[in-house]
Amino acid sequence: MPRSMWGKSIALCALFLAGCKTVPPPQQLKNTSHTFASVVVDAGHGGRDSGAYRRSGPPEKVVTLDVATRLSRKLRDSQFNVVMTRTGDVFIPLDTRVDIENSTPNSIFVSIHFNDSRRRGVKGFETYYHSPYAAELAQNIQNRLCSLKGAVNRGVHTADFRVVRKALYPAVLVECGYLSNRSEGREARNGEYRELLADKIAQAIVEQRHGLGAYQAPATATAPAVVNQEPQPQQQKRKPVLAPPGEGPGLAPPTLSGH
């Protein structure tokens, strides 16, 4: 190959590789882990992306949105600005979620998910992060969730999930238990339990920003609630409920109660 052609090929290759970069350079990362005023709350999945789904529990997209909505309310009560990536059963591309988190100044990002496994006995909480600035937040959320009675601690891990890998601000992804596990899938259907999950995550976020003991849990009366497996008939006029995320084929979201 002529030297001029060789040089041109190298230049084109360099341009291609530069365009493939998906991780912000370290100098662009912003450490707002103790200064954030806003929280971007991401309800995983949605719309045609139902997420994990097992008979013992509702589709992931249903419970994640519910937990995310409860979490957002608690954070607003704690005087944070809250941005939700979705507030209904709609499909939001991952890159759009990244754009939302990166365009919200002085923020952190918390993505809510539920887990799945072929082994029914697997259960427990997991929290993931990518930026070193998010490690402390991830550990605090994991610690609070694992303070729940009977909790199984599956650890805090680094991961390359796009929504944490491409984040400019500290970002974590929380797996709130396994829908494939009979007991955790059953718990996910209960409104009081989803309220507890949101409360523990909110406590960790508030304490991350303001220190231990800063969180004041709102006095909310939530009756035990079950996610119905069948949609409510249209003639029953009930307050519409936000439906959470999931992965997999689109399913009609069941109605949530217990707000």
Image (tube, helix red, strand yellow):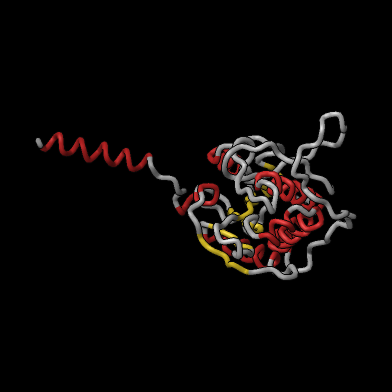
Residue at 73%, 50% in the rendered image: 67
Residue furthest to the top in view is 235
Quarter of the view holding residue 8? top left
Asked if residue 43 shows in the view, the reply is no
Is residue 84 placed above or below 113 in the rendered structure?
A: above
Residue at 65%, 55% in the rendered image: 179
In the drawing, does residue 139 fall left or right of residue 8? right
Is residue 156 placed above or below 191 in the rendered structure?
A: below
Expressed as whole percent of the image width and height from the top left, the position of residue 34 reads 65, 60
> Which of the pair 24/143 is nearer the observer?
143
> Which of the pair 255/194 is nearer the observer?
255
Quarter of the view holding residue 140? bottom right
> Which of the pair 189/105 is nearer the observer?
189
Quarter of the view holding residue 205? bottom right
In the drawing, does residue 66 fall left or right of residue 156? right
Asked if residue 98 shows in the view, the reply is yes
Residue at 73%, 59% in the rendered image: 206
Expressed as whole percent of the image width and height from the top left, the position of residue 178 reads 63, 58
Q: Quadrant of the N terminus?
A: top left
Residue at 77%, 41% in the rendered image: 255
Number of residue marks: 0
Residue furthest to the left in view is 2
Expressed as whole percent of the image width and height from the top left, the position of residue 116 reads 59, 55
Expressed as whole percent of the image width and height from the top left, the position of residue 105 reads 63, 45
